[in-house]
Image (cartoon, rainbow, N blue to C red):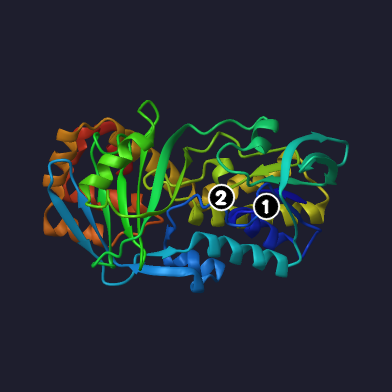
Amino acid sequence: MIVVGGGPVGSSVASLVAGFMRTLVLEEHAEIGAPVQCAGLVSPRVVAMTGTDDTVLNRISGGVVHFPNGVSIELNGKEPKAVVVDRRAFDFKCYEKALDSGAEFILGAKYCSFSKNADSVSIESRVEKNTRILHAKLLVGADGYKSCVGRDAGIGKPRDSVRGIQVDIDRRLDDQNRVHVYLGLKLAPGFFAWVIPCGHFTRVGLCVSTGHDAPSRYLPPFLEKVGLADAERLNSISGIIPIGPPSSTYADRVMVVGDAAAQAKPLSGGGLYTGMVASQCAARTAIEAYEANDFSIRMLSKYQERWKSEIGKELDKGYRIRKVFLRLNDNKINDIGRMIDRQDVLDILSQGDIDYPSMLAPSILRCLPSLLKFSPQILGSLLGR
């Protein structure tokens, strides 16, 4: 099996499969974990799944949501709801785990294309100026939102995407226990902005939906707003988060996983948990296909059945809620802020799970049926209406 992409999701697939068949990972960058492409805010279960406790920079138990009119709502959990990980170290740990399991890696190997043969796939890759043709029974694309593997396999594009930018600031926040989220069309149209305490430094970023200016235009005024415009920037990253998986995430002898399959959570953009779950589904399917010597579309369809069973409902519900959010102007966002600022609703929100945020929707809508006015059909569907 050949995996294209040596990030955490690709490494996870390789780690799980390497004990059953020879597994080779092609990673286009010369160094694992660089460049960093994520806010690094994950649930504690992601750290448990990957055995990466020593990459944790900070533990988060609450949050503050800032509305366009300046009103803030505090959410305080009784235990850590999220952790901030050092993404470079996290990626490297996942890579080491795959190596220990017997997977092989070629760093600096750019995927070029693949073709199908009677009983295998031929993958063309390039390291510097040297081109190689590699052969495998199965090809897994874990090559990010612009998945070339998915493109060449005829797998569709994501339904939506957001563009983001993030900087690490050389400033330690006094409050290390809470993440700050900022809403508003002037700050981050179609998504949100964030301030994350990471111990000795602070991570600040935002995403915007398609159809708006580049996120780099919104960053300077946001840094000014949160009082960090003059602080030293340690590094900066930008990227695209795909939202809404295509209708199929597999083809004959091919599966795509993680951002390549647009499996990020629509409400937060986080993709590590969903990607790890999908990697387990892909690995299980790959092993079964190997044991049956059957890499057909029929066999690989089990992969999609499995990940949809695990995370499909959450991705679908999150996508529907996001559609409602995209229809809101700042006045309506402020209205929602006023409506939810009551203790029973705040108690529900404080109990939320960042990996399954849509699970709160039915309870909140039962407390506040007036929220249905923002989209009766979509929000009503979350109640089974």
In front: 262, or 171?
Answer: 171
Amino acid type, callout 1: Ala
Question: In the image, is residue 157 above or below residue 225?
Answer: above
Q: Find out whether the residues at labels 1 and 2 contact each other: C-beta distance under 8 Å.
A: no
Going 68% across and 64% down the picture, which residue do you hit? Answer: 98
- Please name the residue that numbered disc 1 is placed on: 30
Q: Is residue 62 left or right of residue 318?
A: left
Going 36% across and 69% down the picture, which residue do you hit? Answer: 59
What percent of the width, then of the height, locates residue 113?
75, 34
Q: Which mark is residue 12?
A: none
State which quadrant residue 324 falls in: top left
Question: SS at mark 1?
Answer: loop
Amino acid type, callout 2: Trp
- Please name the residue that numbered disc 2 is placed on: 307
Going 28% across and 38% down the picture, which residue do you hit? Answer: 379
Quadrant location of the C terminus in the rendered image: top left
In front: 43, or 133?
Answer: 133
What percent of the width, then of the height, locates residue 197?
32, 62
What percent of the width, then of the height, locates residue 330?
18, 34
Q: In 3D space, how far apart are the residues under numbered discs 1 and 2 (Cα atoms)?
A: 31 Å
Q: Residues within 10 Å of mark 2 (few under 14, many from 20)?
A: many
Question: SS at mark 2?
Answer: helix
Going 57% across and 41% down the picture, which residue do you hit? Answer: 261
For discs 1 and 2, the disc positioned in front in the rendered view? 1
Q: Residues within 10 Å of mark 1 (few under 14, many from 20)?
A: few
Q: Is residue 313 left or right of residue 375?
A: right
Numbered-mark total: 2
Pick out the residue farthest to the right. Answer: 118
Pick out the residue farthest to the top. Answer: 211
Q: Is residue 47 left or right of residue 168?
A: right
